Image (cartoon, helix red, strand yellow):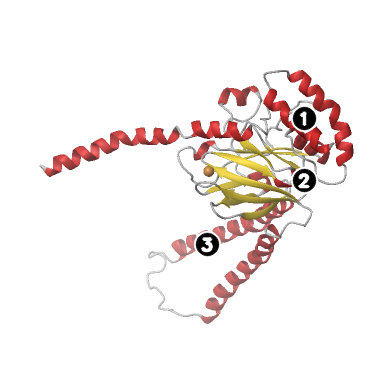
């Protein structure tokens, strides 16, 4: 009898499992509201002043995966180029060499020492010369791999220079937040675009987001990476960048991309039902355009040109306020604040 009860409980559990998963999937709803709330004084890229910032179109095949691709993505950071070189010039040829050599030995043994050709097997158990060779050669191979790879590892985790721009990356279930403490500490909330919206903007679905993380080109950016709920992982394959986002801990790594453009990545640590739907989009802009983007978000621009900024900004910000009219009142507010702050 108890067997039947157990079977029924199990069956019921199995039936309800998808419902439970869906219940979890409903999560993004409050997340979106939350995003809306925290984005209020930030404004989405949809609401950003088009005179200051319009999202850049991605270059096909750059900063994103390609159909049928078997290689790594083309690299746009120094460490990425080094790592890609180590892979293609050292690791892959060695793997091929060792595999072919072992395969050759195997065939040689199968053919030459088969029972038909070699009915009386040798009783040899030791050969000092061969034993030295098969110890020393692998050690040399490991050394050849270790030297460039350990130095690359060390280079990847060199601390950022003092004047590097800091961006704090926070993983949430299931979207990303990017805050800019050096630029007035505004936060950009970044969620995946729905399919039709991604298509409309000419961006790859499941990689494209509403509000991108924007950084200046060719400059080291100090990323402080953390999470608000569970472990996520921030990654940009075209920059050879991946670092875990752990709640209660701040991981730091320098991100530097040497070409303007749009680069996509994904959360790379299984973090729940919508793990596959929290992509990362990084837009790399020239210093001037980056500063414009900061201003469009109501942030302040670091460094000397503050006064010029106010002058240059006065006009466009006001035009924006006029042009956007009533319904975007909250979005024009940051621009006015920026003007007030710089005055
Ligand atoms: Cu995640």
Whether residue 144 sits left or right of residue 307 in the image: it is: left
Crowding near the residue tagged with mark 2, few <14, some 14–19, many ≥20 C-alpha atoms within 10 Å: some
Crowding near the residue tagged with mark 3, few <14, some 14–19, many ≥20 C-alpha atoms within 10 Å: few
Looking at the image, is mark 1 or mark 2 earlier in the sequence? 2
Q: Can residue 55 be spotted in the picture?
A: no
Distance from disc 1 to disc 2, alpha carbons, whole Å, reads: 33 Å
**Quick one: which residue is furthest to the left in this view?**
1
Identify the residue position indicated by label 2 in the image: 258
Q: Can residue 334 be spotted in the picture?
A: yes
Q: Residue at x 66, y 25 (%)?
A: 201
Looking at the image, is mark 3 or mark 2 earlier in the sequence? 3
In the rendered image, the quadrant that contains the N terminus is top left
- Residue 25 point in image, percent of width and height: 44, 34
The nearer-to-camera label among 1 and 2 is 1
The residue tagged with tag 3: helix, strand or loop? helix
> Vertical placement of 187 versus 166: above or below?
above
Identify the residue position indicated by label 1 in the image: 336
Distance from disc 3 to disc 1, alpha carbons, whole Å, reads: 70 Å
Q: Are marks 3 and 1 in contact (CB under 8 Å)?
A: no
Distance from disc 3 to disc 2, alpha carbons, whole Å, reads: 41 Å
The nearer-to-camera label among 3 and 2 is 2
The nearer-to-camera label among 3 and 1 is 1
Whether residue 192 sits left or right of residue 41 in the image: it is: left
Q: Residue at x 89, y 33 (%)?
A: 311
> Vertical placement of 98 versus 20: above or below?
below
Asked where in the image residue 337 lies, by quadrant, the reply is: top right
Residue at disc 2, CB closer than 8 Å to ligand 1: no
Residue at disc 3, CB closer than 8 Å to ligand 1: no
Identify the residue position indicated by label 3 in the image: 102
- Residue 263 point in image, percent of width and height: 68, 39
């Amino acid at each position: 009898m108890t067997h039947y009860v157990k079977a029924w409980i199990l069956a019921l559990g199995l039936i309800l499992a998808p419902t439970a998963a869906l219940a979890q999937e409903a999560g993004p709803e409050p997340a979106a509201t939350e995003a809306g709330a925290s984005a209020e004084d930030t404004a989405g890229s949809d609401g950003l002043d088009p005179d200051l910032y319009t999202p850049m179109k991605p270059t096909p095949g750059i900063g994103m995966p390609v159909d049928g691709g078997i290689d790594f993505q083309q690299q746009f950071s120094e460490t990425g180029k080094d790592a890609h070189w180590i892979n293609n010039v050292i690791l892959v040829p060695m793997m091929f060499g060792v595999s072919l050599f072992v395969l050759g030995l195997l065939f040689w043994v199968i053919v030459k020492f088969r029972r038909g050709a070699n009915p009386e097997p040798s009783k040899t158990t030791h050969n000092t010369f061969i034993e030295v060779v098969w110890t020393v050669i692998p050690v040399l191979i490991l050394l050849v791999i270790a030297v460039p790879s350990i130095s690359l590892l060390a280079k990847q985790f060199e601390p950022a220079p003092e004047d590097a721009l800091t961006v704090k990356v926070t993983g949430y279930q299931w979207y990303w937040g990017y805050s800019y403490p050096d630029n007035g500490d505004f936060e950009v909330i970044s969620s995946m675009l729905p399919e039709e919206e991604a298509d409309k903007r000419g961006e790859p679905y499941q990689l494209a987001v509403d509000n991108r993380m924007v950084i200046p080109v060719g400059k080291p950016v100090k990323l402080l990476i953390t999470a608000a709920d569970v472990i996520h992982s921030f990654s940009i394959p075209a920059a050879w960048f991946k670092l875990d986002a752990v709640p209660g801990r701040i991981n730091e790594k320098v991100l530097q991309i040497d070409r303007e453009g749009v680069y996509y990545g994904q959360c790379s640590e299984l973090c729940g039902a919508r793990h596959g739907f929290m992509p990362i989009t990084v837009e790399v802009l020239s210093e001037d355009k980056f500063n414009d983007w900061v201003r469009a978000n109501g942030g302040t621009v670091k460094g000397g040109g503050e006064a010029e900024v106010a002058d240059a900004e006065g006009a466009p910000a006001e035009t924006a306020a006029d042009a956007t009219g009533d319904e975007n009142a909250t979005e024009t507010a940051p621009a006015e604040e920026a003007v007030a702050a710089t005055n």
